[in-house]
Image: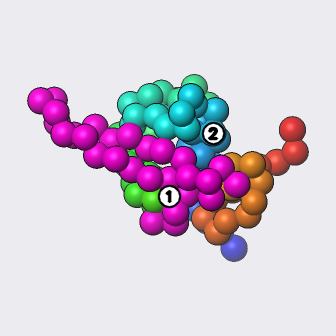
Amino acid sequence: MKTFAEKLAEDRRLMVLRSLCEATGYNLNEGVLKKALHHLACIVGADQVRADAVWLEEHGLVEVEKLVGPSGELWIVRLTSAGQDVAEGRQHPGVARPGAS
C-alpha cells in the first residue's frame, strides 16, 4: 500500500505534466511551474519543483534545460511526447492517473 507522501508525489507529478501540456510550446520555467502548482493548490518550494523535474526527466516524461545567467541557474522544463501521453491518461508508475472529468 502506498503512503500518503507517495500519493501526494504522484498527484504533484501529474499536475506538472498537465501544466506543461497546457503551456504554449509545452514548456515552462521552474518559477512559472511553481506558480502553476500553487494555483492548483499544491504549495511547493523550488527544491521540490526541481526534484520532480529530475524524477520526470529520469523517466523520459520531460526534458530539463539548465540556463546559467547573472542571477544563477534557471531550469526550463519541456514536455516530451511520452509525458503528454501520461498527462492524457496513459499509466506510468509514480504518476497519478487522471480521473474522469
Looking at the image, which residue is at 50% across and 58% down?
56
Q: CA distance from mark 2 to mark 1?
A: 14 Å
Query: Which region of the structure is painted magenta?
Result: 58-85
Instruction: Give the residue pinned by disc 2.
Output: 21
Q: Residue at x 70, y 54 (%)?
A: 85
Residue at the extreme left: 70
Residue closer to the observer: 63 or 3: 63
How is colour applied across the structure in the image?
Answer: rainbow
N-term mark: 2 or 1? 2
Residue 71 image position (x, y, % from top left): 16, 29
Q: Is residue 4 visible?
A: no
Residue that numbered label 1 is attached to = 56
* Rendered-image quadrant of the C terminus: top right
Q: Choose between 64 and 16: the one closer to the eye.
A: 64
Residue 99 location in percent, x, y? 82, 48
- For badge 1, the amino acid type reads Leu
5 vs 64: above or below: below
